[in-house]
Amino acid sequence: MISLTDTQKIGMGLTGFGVFFLFFGMILFFDKALLAIGNVLFVAGLAFVIGLERTFRFFFQKHKMKATGFFLGGVLVVLIGWPLIGMIFEIYGFFLLFRGFFPVVVGFIRRVPVLGSLLNLPGIRSFVDKVGESNNMV
């Protein structure tokens, strides 16, 4: 089992609450207050989990500047008060930022008994295969 420091445990909690508030804010027709809280908690939790320096190194790599711009720009647009446009920017930036992790996640989910069989259904399989391909950032 992986042992986590107290700081990482706090970060996991903050990240979890951030994802919850983001999801709940989208369910409630893009409530800007919930989305803003979710954004702040998610980014703060990420910094607690992997550390402040590694967070900055992850977001500000030269080949990820476009993705970072869209993600953090979306956070800013949500905080300003345009939640739908901000979330579109954030989702696009999120997919660009974390594109390299998708093959790992798809490979893991395919090994889970029930979820793996769901991913092999005819309509879903082609989409998951496309998402699971490891492509370089454009």
Image (cartoon, helix red, strand yellow):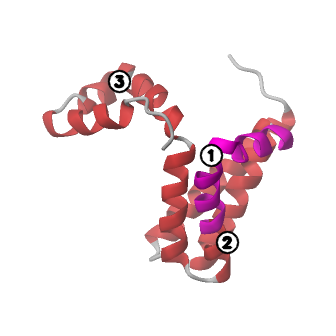
**Residue range corresponding to the magenta coloring:** 52-74
Residue 133 image point, x, y percent: 37, 30
Q: Is residue 106 magenta?
A: no
On the image, which quarter does residue 68 sit in? bottom right
Amino acid tagged 2: Leu
On the image, which quarter does residue 69 sit in? bottom right
Q: Nearer the viewer, residue 105 or 94?
A: 94
The residue that appears at 61% across and 72% down in the rendered structure is 34
- Of mark 1 and mark 3, the one earlier in the sequence is 1
Residue 23 image point, x, y percent: 51, 61
Numbered label attached to residue 76: 2
- Of mark 2 and mark 3, the one earlier in the sequence is 2
Numbered label attached to residue 110: 3
The answer to whether the residue labelled 2 contacts the one labelled 1, judged by CB atoms less than 8 Å apart, is no
Residue that lies at the very extreme toward the left in this rendered image = 122
Closer to us: mark 2 or mark 3? 2
Q: Secondary structure at mark 3?
A: helix
Main SS of the magenta segment? helix
- Which residue matches tag 1? 64
Res. 10 visible in picture: no
| Alpha carbons under labels 2 and 3: distance apart | 36 Å
Q: Is residue 58 magenta?
A: yes
Closer to us: mark 2 or mark 1? 1
- Of mark 2 and mark 1, the one earlier in the sequence is 1
Residue that lies at the very extreme toward the top in this rendered image = 1
Q: Tag 2: Cα neighbours inside 10 Å, few (<14), some, or many (≥20)?
A: some
Amino acid tagged 3: Arg
Q: Tag 3: Cα neighbours inside 10 Å, few (<14), some, or many (≥20)?
A: some
The answer to whether the residue labelled 1 contacts the one labelled 3, judged by CB atoms less than 8 Å apart, is no
